[in-house]
Amino acid sequence: MSELETFRAETRAWLEQNCPPEMRKPVTGDADICWGGRRFQFQSPAQQQWMQRMAERGWTVPTWPKEYGGAGLSKAQEQVLRKTMRELGCRSPLDSFGIWMLGPALLRYGSQEQKLEHLPKIARGEIRWCQGYSEPNAGSDLASLQTRAELHGDHFVVNGQKIWTSYADKADWIFCLVRTDFGAKKHTGISFLLFDMQSPGVSTKPIMLISGRSPFCETFFDDVKVPARNLVGELNAGWTIAKYLLTHEREMISGIGDRSAVPPLGRFAAAKVGTDAAGCLADSMLRADVARFEIDELAFRSLLERTGELARKGQGDPAFSSALKYYGAELNKRRYELMMSAAGSDALEWEGERSSDGALARAWLRTKANSIEGGTSEVQLNIVAKRLLGLPGA
Amino acid sequence: MPLTINDEQQMLRDSAQAFLGERAPVLHLRKLRDSADPIGFDRQLWRAFGEMGFAGVLIPEQHGGVGLGIVEAGIIAEQLGHTLTPSPFLSSAVLSASALARAGSTAQQAQWLPKIASGEAVLALALDETSNHRPRTLATTATATRDGYQLDGEKCFVVDGHVADALLVCASTQSSDGMQRGTSLFLIDAHAPGVTRERTTMLDAHNASRITLRGVQVTGEALVGEPDTADALLSTVLDIGRLMLCMELIGIADEVFARTLAYLKERKQFDRTIGEFQALQHRMAALYCDIELARAITARALDAMGADPVAARATVSAAKVRCCASANLAVCEAVQMHGGMGMTDAFDIGLYMKRARVAQHWLGDANFHADRFAQLNAY
């Protein structure tokens, strides 16, 4: 048996032994997601146990080095682990911006001291992070951000405002882009700071969205003192880190289009509108749209895999994540449009147990942000045009 | 599972590209078209194709081929898309060769496979009977006789049928009392009594034919595979052909995309290159993503086909839908972005548009395959 086959067998045995039965049921909503953090309320003892067991093994962040709380797995081993988890129906033990975004950036740009301080806490689900990027006047044009940080001896003083900060009201720490040089060109005067959301002068205010939910906040900084050692990378060189991290964010959001966990749309539609004597979806116009969607979804999943393969061969281009983000976001919006069509008036219910308080309607509305957050579809197309196609002046 | 090609496959691509680029660029197609060539392809070139091992790519070595897989065959088809080279690659070297290699009798294989591989003989598949692809409903009948079958029916869109030496005919088999028994596949001499052929020139300057079968008598030895149960064989053979069309469509899409991108960087209007306009940039970027999706799903379908042809069916149909859509978008955008130039016969883009239309239709268009995909997924 090859080494990888041995790993596969051991992984399966361990997961079967250690994943609680409750954690092998499909995720049904936001409440089933484990975000971790100081104030996180575990939904069940099983959820907590599952996170802790996986963290002990380093499998909440399987490819990170062991000294930072990971398991030091190779890409191939990680694939085996994820595939086995999918096969057994294991839920993700821990989801967080620390894992998806800050972690990869710190691994690349952080000092050894910063890595040792922050990464293990991310891996163990002890600290929940939020991202301080967008501002009221810096959305698609992120580099025009105005939140300022002035260095006073051993600390920075931060003043300004962020917006669309996901879960800022629930997060423990923030990774934040701040302007540290007001004379420089806009891309060159930005720095990357980390600080505790409990620092005096930090306040948050949830923003009610069209879905009736508030996953985003406005975040205000009023003379917030941040130790100078919390600067990641060089002073005024934060834009490079910001872009690197955005690449990871795009990959994460593009993963939305890859819903191997949710039931196939065709099955969902058949259950809602029924089938005719020949077994075809009763609504033939919807059937055609569903088939085209599922074909594009299969193509997108193949493209994600192919992109991974190219990356492992050293033939990938980081800008390709913009192509994936663009298509993944549009695809997910299409999925929910079709789910709304298939579900008809059932999907119009906003409250009550039958609709789980309008879960589908709210989820549909939520997807409209997919092509706005993490860089709009238009910005992604600009990046593809400029970086991958070499078109001028984009 | 590999969705990217390996070093040997890259070498094959390079050699096919060099060969076609030198011997059969788009100008080659123009010459054949403008001289109204009765064959529609160059026999000498086709033999050279055989010498390169391209015509025998799917034929086992013991029958004179090189015995490679469908990924390799796809690489050749992709290059044919770049140059629009007319050749009986799909009809003879892929569809006919696959059917015979998989189900032909020893005598059929010995007689035809080496000649297909060398380019000496051309075989064609006579399947379609109406203007749309409906492989499951055949009106052509094969009625059992004392020592074989009698074939009657009309076939259309038999690509390369006008010059084929032998025809693979799909027919619905019946007992002498008219009872339907199933689908059978026959290999018949194209010059047999009762076979009449009418050459049809298509918009892409390739040739096909309408074929009438009237009381054509064959013995049981003409059967390819078992009688009455050819549906499964046919599905697999057609799926192999569909994947070749996918790769050809990707070749077409890549070629017109590259030409259009180059044009956007060079054409000036309003004192700047038109590639600076965001209205065009976004369309090119979206088209780029579209073509990458087609490439990825086709790679997956080729891989699945190599592993298990029956399990691969839905993925093959998905690939054909995606490749039809991407290539069609590519040629339409290419004509539009080239402006008036794109509408001229002197410019090559229109030739790509015409060939893409034929490749989209052949062996089932996007609607046929979206329907098949839905059926295979039980909705």
Image (spheres, coloured by chain):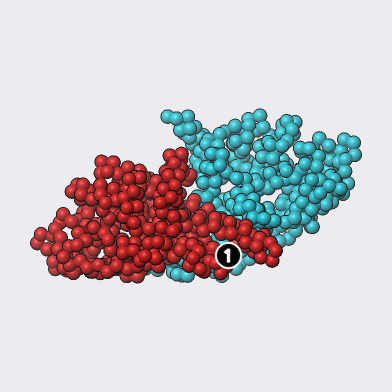
The single residue placed furthest to the left in the displayed view is B146
Choose between B23 and A344: the one closer to the eye. B23
Which quarter of the figure has residue A375? Answer: bottom right
Residue at image coords 25%, 47%: B114
Which quarter of the figure has residue A211? Answer: bottom right
User: Where residue A361 appears, x then y in whole percent?
Assistant: 61, 64
User: Where residue A258 appears, x then y in whole percent?
Assistant: 55, 52
Chain of the residue where label 1 is placed in the rendered structure? B
Residue B49 vs residue A173: left or right?
Answer: left
Chain letter for the part of the structure drawn in red = B
**Secondary structure at numbered mark 1:** helix
Q: Colour of chain A?
A: cyan
Choose between A394 and B120: the one closer to the eye. B120
Which residue position is annotated with label 1?
A: B337
Residue B354 vs residue B154: left or right?
Answer: right
Mark 1: give few (<14), some (14-19) or many (20+) Cα within 10 Å: many
Residue B155 vs residue A115: left or right?
Answer: left
Choose between A296 and A36: the one closer to the eye. A296
User: Where residue A209 appears, x then y in whole percent?
Assistant: 71, 61
Which quarter of the figure has residue A326? Answer: bottom right
